[in-house]
Each structure stands twice: as structure tokens, then as C-alpha cells.
Amino acid sequence: MDVIFHAHHAVISDRVRARAQSAVERVASRLKRSVDAVVRFEGDGRTRRVEIVLHAPRHRRLVAEGHAPFFGAALGNAIRCIEAQLRSTKRTPKKRRGALTLRASRA
């Protein structure tokens, strides 16, 4: 999977870039056949903004953004938003059936 970084009016440290790379790869592993991700870093005054766009075939685009005073916190907010979108995506009948059998075995 390709991860593309864009920085607009911002200087991104290698540590934040590596953290973004690993977080996007972790989230993308939950999607089947994810193609690429675009991570945009923007600095505008005191506010830092991180936007993540995740592409996968036969899925809608997942877009999340986070705002914070620092890029690390903004990245965390964006990752949390994208994970919430993944939790709310439609599940296939096979996955729903697996969840039902798992729930029945616990009872």
C-alpha cells in the first residue's frame, strides 16, 4: 500500500511521519485490498490540521481530519475518526453470521 504525504505550510518531523505511516497501515489492514492513503498536514497559525484519505476498491473513500495545537494530537484525532468509520461500515452476511455464532457461544 502506498502512503502519500503532503505538507502545506508545515514542517513534519520523521517521528510524526513514521507514526502516521504505521497508524495508516494498521487501519488499512482492517480493509481488504487497500490501495493507497493520502495524509495531509497543514499548519495555519496556531492550529494544526491532519487529513487522512484512505482508498480501497469496492469501498467508499474514508476521509477523516483532526485539529489540534500540535501535529501528533491532530494525527491521533484523525486516526480515531477513521477507526470509527471502519466500525460503522457495512458487514457482509458471512461476517454477521460469524458474529452471531461468537455471541451465542459466549452465552
Image: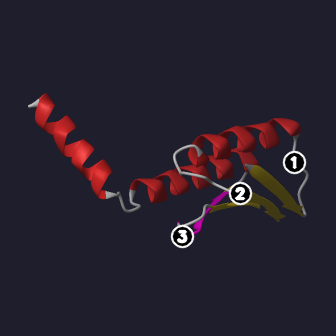
Q: Earlier in the sequence, mark 1 or mark 3?
A: 1
Residue range highlighted in magenta: 59-67
Residue at the bottom extreme? 60
Q: Nearer the viewer, mark 2 or mark 1?
A: 2
Q: Position of residue 71 (x, y in %)?
A: 75, 49
- The tag on residue 60 is 3
Measure how far apart labels 1 and 3 are at the Cα level: 28 Å
Q: Position of residue 59 (x, y in %)?
A: 53, 66
Q: Which amino acid does label 2 sit on?
A: Ala
Report helix, strand or loop for mark 2: strand
Which residue lies under the disc numbered 1? 12
Judge the density around disc 2: few (<14), some (14-19), many (≥20) Cα neighbours within 10 Å. Answer: many
Q: Which of marks 3 and 2 is nearer the N terminus?
A: 2
Judge the density around disc 3: few (<14), some (14-19), many (≥20) Cα neighbours within 10 Å. Answer: few
Q: Does the magenta stretch include residue 10?
A: no
Report helix, strand or loop for mark 1: loop
Q: Nearer the viewer, mark 1 or mark 3?
A: 3
Q: What residue type is labelled 1?
A: Ile
Measure how far apart labels 2 and 1 are at the Cα level: 17 Å
Judge the density around disc 1: few (<14), some (14-19), many (≥20) Cα neighbours within 10 Å. Answer: some
User: Which sits in the foreground, 92 or 67?
Assistant: 92
Q: Quadrant of residue 51?
A: bottom right
